Amino acid sequence: MCSGLSLQSSQYVVPEDVRAAGFQIDADELTSIVESRDTERLTEHGQLDGIADKLATSLTDGISTREGLLGQRQEIYGVNKFAESEPRSFWEFVWDALQDTTLIILAACAFVSLTVGIATEGWPNGSHDGIGIFASIILVVSVTATSDYQQSLQFRDLDKEKRKILVQVTRDGFRQRTLIDDLLPGDVVHLAVGDQVPADGVFISGFSLLLDESSLTGESEPVDVNEDKPFLSSGTKVLDGSGQMLVTAVGMRTQWGKLMAALTEGGNDETPLQVKLSGVANIIGKIGLFFAVLTFIVLSQELIGQKYHDGLLLSWSGDDVLEILNHFAVAVTIVVVAVPEGLPLAVTLSLAYAMEKMMNDKALVRQLAACETMGSATVICSDKTGTLTSNRMTVVKACICGNTLEFNDPLSSLSSELPEVAVETLLESILTNTGGEVVIDQNGKQDIIGTPTETALLEFALSLGGNYKQKRQESKIVKVEPFNSVKKRMTVILELPGGGYRAHCKGAAEIVLAACDKFIDGSGSVVPLDKKTANLLNDTIETFSSEALRTLCLAYRGLEDGSTQEEIPLQGYTFIGIVGIKDPVRLGVRESVASCRSAGIAVKMVTGDNINTAKAIARECGILTDGGLAIEGAEFREKTPEELLELIPKMQVCHSSVLSWLRKSIHLVNSHVLVLCN
């Protein structure tokens, strides 16, 4: 068996240019291993450690930027960019504009008018009509082509901006953010819930990592990624868990890159208005052409009839030809007048103007049709976090040991106001049960990497005197259940330095509090959580929420066994504290909501937060009015279709699950046009 493996492994020969650059495996071999998900070949190369060695990287410190190998890595393995189609030239847009049926008819008429005019009236008097028609055609084509060309340039720039995505990597031993385009094979990438896998790679470590690969495979079933199934593909999305991956292929060598290369970009579709006007123009043009032909026949029949009567049908003088040309000129005049040559120009100019105005308002319009269809919108359903709010969060209030505390000043003195055991437990809970990380950058400065919520909590812990690195080293994390929108809680199990295990839980305040049966009192003792205290804590949650604060509850419990095979308990926790996190409303949101309302557009806020928090922020934004309704998902789903028809127009704040229902049951709200802003 071993000799067989050795024989297979020896079949791979490292190309000389790869070896000369300091690597022991080429891009094609790496791509093939991940694409075919070949664990045997991965084993032949020494598993994950072997691949890392051959890529001249470290699974803990990442690639080194000081060795001068970055340029060689790019040369050998490529860059994390997809091949772009060649930009279309201005003359291609001119050619597209000339394909318009109306313009083709006008061009034919212009040619005939020019010919007849010069023949009958001479140059230059007879050329005025024909040149005028040609000039109008040139104007329409120029405006259309210029508008489309400028639009294509703007969206090429927009596509470049869209690629400026920051991913978290470890390089030179430091965790840092880097642009997705700068990723290279050998990079160690950190993944969390909601992230898109930025390149092909191999799993290093993590907890409960679950991927959605439907964009690649079409399979809707989520895929577990672990040491037994270690391959990750670019373009897939992290549904649950967290982890680290070693990048093995980037750009056009990834499966996603090859898929993108196989897809061809479709042409620009006409807007609904342009389709309708084109239909009208074609009908008018055909009617005009019919009457032009009829007029030509009626005018010419006398001359042709006379010649037929005289037997001179095959004998034509110059005067006869000029008379026929005059009749033809009349017919051409009818066509020119009947065909609405101004429609293409009018539509293009108006939509281009609308797009420019929207871009000045920082609304990027990908399709011109959006300028038109947005005019029919009567309802905007907007997400809260990051859309209505600034997504810059800070802990401003907390309820610890039964005391409600406000934090407007430095918090270092807070430690002396609370029992030491309560502060230590609070710091352990925040610093270990987190999806964020406190890192030291290359300049020696402390930085926090993570979501805005995690960043706010870590800043709070550090201000209390917490030491992130020390706390993480003291306690070994055995198991992690990452936060998701269904459970609304995150839990970790720690193996304590003195032996034993402890579970720390944080999440939606009302959910975590319901799982607690004990709490830390003002003396630092753990006592039973009676009904009176529970009611006081629930009142605190409502008070924080009514002040537009996002509330999180922290709790812990001891465990006899830290086995990763068993489910983390859902009950029996000890309450540590409640924190209130402020997420300020964006500047100008209230004015924008008022503008929408004055234009007849209703704005509804969709959020997964506590309903009281949502109502407070909605009032601050001007969304929730006196007659408006705020409703949770559970209450919404209990309503009958008839009740919903009356309810929906009044609804101004709703849970995110309501939005899912609306998408499935859009026929119930056919009197509204919904615009979803996530």
Image: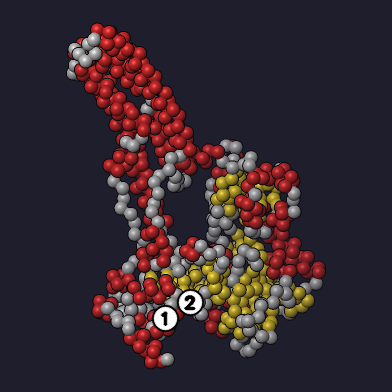
Q: Which x, y percent locates residue 422?
A: 67, 77
- The colour style of the image is secondary structure
**Looking at the image, which is closer to me, 108 or 70?**
108
**Identity of the residue furthest to the right in this view:** 531
Say which residue appears at 68% left-offset and 74% top-offset.
555
Earlier sequence position, callout 1 versus callout 2: 1
In this view, 584 is above or below 360? below
At a point 69% along the width and 79% down the height, the residue shown is 557
Task: Identify the secondary structure beneath mark 2.
Answer: loop
According to the picture, the residue beneath numbered tag 1 turns out to be 42
Q: Which residue is the site of mark 2?
A: 230
Quick check: can you spot residue 303? no
Asked whether the residues under the numbered discs 1 and 2 touch, taking CB atoms below 8 Å apart as contact, a structural biologist would say yes
Residue 492, x across and y down, in percent: 61, 77
User: Can see residue 28?
Assistant: yes
Please state the total of marks drawn on the protein image: 2
Secondary structure type for disc 1: helix
Relative to 249, say whether 322 is above or below.
above
Horizontal relation, residue 487 to residue 304: left or right: right
Q: List x then y, in percent, for residue 616.
A: 66, 53
Categorize mark 1 by other alpha carbons within 10 Å: few (<14), some (14-19), many (20+).
Answer: some
Instruction: Give 309 or 212, whichever is nearer the viewer.
Output: 309
Name the residue at 23% across, 10% down. 311
> Alpha-carbon neighbours of circle 2 within 10 Å: few (<14), some, or many (≥20)?
some
Real-space Cα distance between discs 1 and 2? Answer: 10 Å
| Residue 488 position in % (x across, y down) | 64, 66
At label 1, which amino acid type do we have?
Leu
Q: Quadrant of residue 460?
A: bottom right
Q: Is residue 339 left or right of residue 225?
A: left
Work out whether 420 lies above or below 272: below
Give the residue displayed 36% in from the left and 35% down from the top: 100
